[in-house]
Image (cartoon, rainbow, N blue to C red):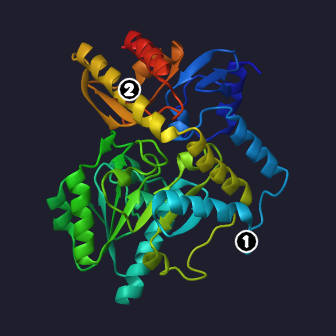
Amino acid sequence: MKKEECIARAEKVLMHTYARYQVVLDHGEGVYLYDTDGKKYLDFSAGIAVFALGYGDEKYNEAIKEQAGKLLHTSNYYYNEPTTFAAEKLVKASGMSRVFFTNSGTEAIEGAIKLARKYYYKKHGTADSEIIAMEHSFHGRSMGALSVTGTSKYRAAFEPLIGGAVFAEYNKLESVKAKITEKTAAVIMETVQGEGGIYPADKEFLQGVRKLCDEKGILLILDEIQCGMGRTGTMYAYQQYGVLPDIMTTAKALGCGVPVGAFAATEEVAAAYEPGDHGTTYGGNPFVTHAVSTVFDRFEELNLLANVKETGAYLYEQLEALSSRHTDSITAHRGVGLMQGLEFKNPVKDIITRAMDAGLILIAAGTNIIRFVPPLVIKKEHVDEMIGILEKSL
């Protein structure tokens, strides 16, 4: 099918919830994507931080083919080996104790919010609780996730949302302190804000919030859906801060393409959930969890964390140099590992379009920030290729 025909047919039947670029992608190989016309693109978006292994990883593909031919789904009334193995590996990687697999990151947030409320209910005997979230945060698009998303453009058309959410300023400990009441059940935040502009948490801030939560008997929920799974150089970003959350959420690169997320908790907090409190039909089925288990194996076999640290440092150097050459248009550069951003004076849509025309796929964070979240298998030569195309596109 020709590109124009595919786009025209899609526009007739799909809801207009995405401002899609005029490209019909067909297949991928390594860190490159190809459209239906055979055009090659260097991919620095990884399906919004999903394809950590890049495209066509042979062992990953063989693993999901094998499981597809064996057993896709059973429901959670029964045990299965892939889910057990995946949960064991996630517990080991995260430092948490118990796992609940979901179908997406948004569902992981929903489960985490419910768990925090149930823990508060069991502790205080009342459901009248509050959760402190952060301004400019993004946690998903369901009604519960929107309730703790501190960006008005995502919320305005869908209010009233679920009550009990208040918002503090990210990286300002005094702002969090000021929001705490006897009703506070939890504080939720992204360890690195993604959609809000690629803002890592300050070490003093995150450690300070952890201390506050300990002192007040409040749960700390860390959203690692985008910044987790090795993207910042450790398996989970909070591991660079010397803190452990009470609940954490993960998705995106957890499955490297299959729809899966999870939330995990400490033993004490997880015990608040009892049979019937939460559930899912598809979540944690043997197909997706075999993919998750394979992803953890491939991270280790490919030594991906070391590559993220080395290539991420090189990306930082090159983006710093690019910024210094374009001070007329670039106002800031920030990030860590292979999760970085360039902030511009003006909207970046035209830059991204020109880069795509030249064979480079980039995505934005907000209107004036270009987000760099490539596959974790990229090398320095891919950074050089990206910089060359981006510079011509500015």
Q: Position of residue 306 (x, y in %)?
A: 46, 38
Say whether residue 114 is visible. Answer: yes
- Please tell me whether mark 2 sits on a helix, a strand or a loop: helix
Q: Amino acid at mark 1?
A: Tyr
Q: Quadrant of the N terminus?
A: top right
Say whether residue 255 is visible. Answer: no
Q: Earlier in the sequence, mark 1 or mark 2?
A: 1
Please tell me how crowded label 2 is: few (under 14), some (14-19), or many (20+) other residues with Cα within 10 Å. Answer: many
Residue 154 vs 266, above or below: the answer is above
Q: Position of residue 150 (x, y in %)?
A: 32, 53
Most distant residue in the right direction: 69
Seen from the viewer's position, the closer of residues 139 and 151 is 139
Q: Is residue 199 left or right of residue 264?
A: left
Residue 74: quadrant of the picture: bottom right
Q: Amino acid at mark 2?
A: Leu
Mark number, residue 303: none
Taking the spot 44% from the left edge, 16% from the top edge, the residue there is 384
Residue 97 vs 175, above or below: the answer is below
Q: Provide the residue designation for mark 1.
A: 79
Q: Provide the residue designation for mark 2.
A: 315
Q: Position of residue 114 (x, y in %)?
A: 47, 72
